[in-house]
Image (cartoon, rainbow, N blue to C red):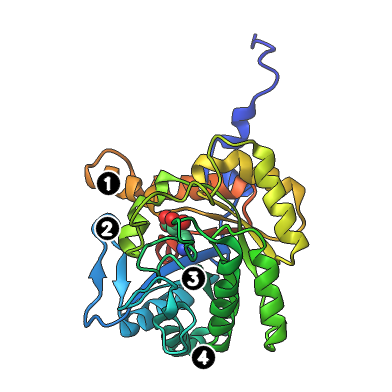
Amino acid sequence: MNARFPQVRPRRLRRTGAMRRMVAGTRPHPADLILPVFVKEGIAEPQPVASMPGVVQHTRESLRKAAHEAAEAGVGGIMLFGIPAYKDARGSAADDPDGIVQVALRDIAGEVGDSLVVMTDTCLDEYTDHGHCGLLTDSGEVDNDATLERYAAAAVAQAAAGAQMVAPSGMMDGQVAAIRAALDANGFADIPIMAYSAKYASAFYGPFRDAAECAPQFGDRAAYQQDPAGPVGEALREVRLDLAEGADAVMVKPALAYLDVLRQVRDLVDVPVAAYQVSGEYAMVEAAAANGWIDRERIIMESLVAIRRAGADLILTYWATEVARRLS
Ligand code: PBG
């Protein structure tokens, strides 16, 4: 006679692929994905980023193509980062109507702007010669309040060039309010703000600094980005402040090492929550996969599922187009 136990058998729902597919609780969708892209001024050919195999610094033309491919794959949005030919202390190219991001926005916003959301990173580090995210005081500190005016001007220039959403990433206090006021005053009341609200001073950004050519020339970003070991309440406070200042969506960054923060933010707010799977997360997987040490496709999907399960509605990932194709 058969044993009467185990009476409870969770494995029943795992036995076949069809069963697992039916009961799956987390299903990443192409439209949840946002593709970060780099566009560089004054280059004739796309330049590979050594520490991010598969990622390039785009020319205007190759960016156009990448935007079309993302749209075709059903990706939800594209986030532009610009690398200007000339940098100065105030990051002049950030709000120059002929700056590289503004030019690139005009190239693609009209072409793909109905099929995916064209958005911009609003910050100064890609544009300053010193590589910090804001203006510096004489003693070399980042001047919070003076920087706000630069962010406001950059956001208005981006919106004027066709950005459909702006994403301030500099972690200055009051940046969302300053940008909201400037957008509203310049006829862009309809342009939403996705705030990089809980952004940590992370070593996972290493490869990005090659891609965007924005490594700080001295010091680091620890005086404005959050301490990974800081109180979790600090992240929630930043999120609350950004919402009070008018943020339409919030972000946690990096993603995989901060899933606990992501979950707490998700439980706190009623706006869309994004998570940024950053350059170092990408590079680690590509490097291990190139060595044959991990199953690249499975790791990518598993990490995206984990980020979704932790509460992200939107995921910024350099694999967006590839994954979107695989999902559809
Ligand atoms: C700042 C910005 C950074 C990233 C996105 N926006 C760099 C930083 O804060 O140092 C990093 C993204 C990545 O690592 O993929 N403009």
Mark 3 or mark 2, which has the lower sequence index?
Answer: 2
Label 2 near label 1: C-beta < 8 Å?
yes
Q: Amino acid at mark 3?
A: Met
Task: Note whether 152 is above or below 48 in the view shown.
Answer: below
Given residues 137 and 153, the one toward you in this image is: 137
Residue 79: mark: 3
Mark 1 and mark 3: Cα distance apart in space: 24 Å
Q: Amino acid at mark 1?
A: Ala
Q: Residue furthest front?
A: 138
Residue 306: mark: none
In the rendered structure, the answer to whether residue 320 lies left or right of residue 85 reads: right
Mark 1 and mark 2: Cα distance apart in space: 8 Å
Mark 4 or mark 1, which has the lower sequence index?
Answer: 4
Residue pointed to by mark 2: 53
**Which is closer to the viewer, label 1 or label 3?**
3
Q: Amino acid at mark 4?
A: Gly
Task: Note whether 247 is above or below 216 in the view shown.
Answer: below
Residue 287: mark: 1
Residue 110: mark: 4
Mark 1 or mark 2, which has the lower sequence index?
Answer: 2
Q: Quadrant of residue 242?
A: bottom right
- In the rendered image, residue 138, in percent from the top left (x then y), is placed at 45, 61
Q: Secondary structure at mark 1?
A: helix
Figure quadrant of the N terminus: top right
Given residues 177 and 308, the one toward you in this image is: 177
**Which is closer to the viewer, label 3 or label 2?**
3
